[in-house]
Image (cartoon, helix red, strand yellow):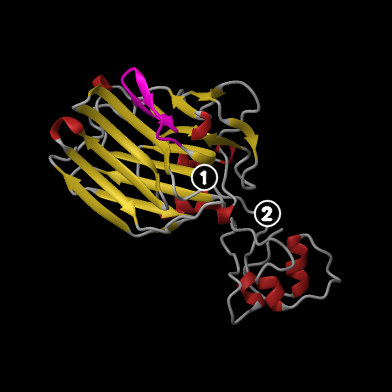
Amino acid sequence: MAISNSGPVSCNDVMTELGNATDTQVSIQNLCSGDVGDINQASTIKPNGSAPYSLSDFRGYDHAATVDMSSLQTSLISWHEFNETSGGTIADSHGTHTGTNTGAELSQSANSGTGTSYHFNEGRDNYAMYDTYNDVFDGTNSIITVACWVKLDNITSTHRIFVNHAYKSDSDTRALIFGVNDSRPRITAYYDDNGGYHHWIANTGAIASGAWKLIVAEIDVSGTPAGSIYVNNSSISLNYAEGGTPPSVLSDTTEGANFSTGKIYTGSDTANIGMMGYISQIVVWDKILSATERGWLYNSGNGIQYADI
C-alpha cells in the first residue's frame, strides 16, 4: 500500500513500502538514494536522493506503481526485439515487417530490460533484411523516429544499423541511413536523382564501444528540417548539412522500401558496409517522441520490451 500523501512518514513506513524488514538500521540518506531497495521510477513520487534529505519526500510514494506507456503504440510502425533462439526469421512484435537474418549470432546477452540480442560481424557477412516499409514511404510522410539498443565492438568502423536504399540506378537512389560513423551517430535522408540530402551527424566521441547504449534518432524533413539524436536519453550536439534540393518527404512507394542492418541494398546486389556489434531492439515510429516517451524507452538504462507497452 502506498505511503500516505500527508502526515508524518517514518523509516519503518518506507521500509514496509519497499517490502523490507523494519528492524534493519537505515538512515534517511540510505532511503532517499535507494541504498536499501530499488526506488520505483514509475511512482509519481520518487525521491531523487539529493540533499537535503527528508522523509517527507516519500509522501505518496508507491513502490508498486506502474506506468501507462500505451502512447508508445501511437504511430508505431515496427518493433524488432531480436529475442529469437533459432531460425532465420526476425519477428516484428507489433506489425508485419518481418526480417530475415543472415549469419548473425542469436541469443546473445543484452541489458536487463530488453531480453536478448543478435551479434553482427561484417567480416562474417552478417546482415538482416526487413520487409517493405510502405507505411513509412507512402509519398507523403516526412517524419521518422528510430530507436535502438546497441553495443558496438569498436568505434572505428562504419556501423549501418537501419538503412533503406531504394535503388533505381546509380544516379537515382532514395535513401534513409541511420547508423554510427566511427563514434558519431548519424541519420541521413537523400535523393540522388536531384543531388538533394539532409544530413545530421554528431561530434566525435558521442558514443563509446563495449557498453549498451540507447540511440534515438528522429527527423522531420518537411518545412524547416529538424533532426535530433539522443544517447542514453541525453540530447547530443549535431552538425547539420544539406545539399541540392533536399527531400520534403522520405520517399515514395515506387522506389522500394526495404530496410536492412549491416548492408546496403543496391539493386540486385548488396554492399557490405556493415555492422560490428550487438543489437537488442530496433523500433520505428512515424512521429516524434515526447521526452516522457524517450524516458520510458531508456528506463534508467534497463530498457523495455514490446510487452511492457
Looking at the image, tell me whether mark 1 or mark 2 is earlier in sequence order.
2
Taking the image as shown, residue 52 lies to the left or right of residue 272, namely right
Res 2 → quadrant: bottom right
Nearer-the-camera pick, 252 or 8? 252
Considering every residue shown, the one lying at the far bottom of the view is 52
Place of residue 164 in the rendered image (x, y in percent of width and height, measured from the top left): 34, 31
- Between residues 41 and 150, which one lies in front from this camera angle? 150
User: Element under label 1?
Assistant: strand
The N terminus is located in which quarter? bottom right
Expressed as whole percent of the image width and height from the top left, the position of residue 285 reads 39, 38
Amino acid at the residue labelled 2: Ala
- Tell me the magenta residue range: 260-274
Quadrant showing the C terminus: top right
**Which x, y percent locates residue 168?**
23, 21
286 relative to 64 in the view: left or right: left
Estimate how packed mark 2 is, as few (under 14), some (14 to 19) or many (20 or more) residues with alpha carbons within 10 Å: few
Residue 283 lies within the magenta run = no
Q: Which residue is mark 1?
A: 150
Counting from the top left corner in percent of width and height, residue 31 is at 70, 71
Residue ranking furthest to the top: 268
Within the magenta stretch, is there residue 269?
yes
Residue at screen point 83% across, 69% down = 22
Q: Kindly tell me whether residue 280 is visible in this rendering.
A: yes
Residue corresponding to mark 2: 64
Residue in view at x 65 percent, y 41 percent: 109
In the depicted structure, whether residue 190 falls above or below residue 289: above
- The kind of residue on which mark 1 rests is Val
Residue sitting farthest toward the front: 123
- Residue at image position (71%, 68%) is 35
Residue drawn where x is 53% and y is 35% of the image: 120
Q: Is residue 18 above or below residue 156?
A: below
Q: Which mark is residue 192?
A: none
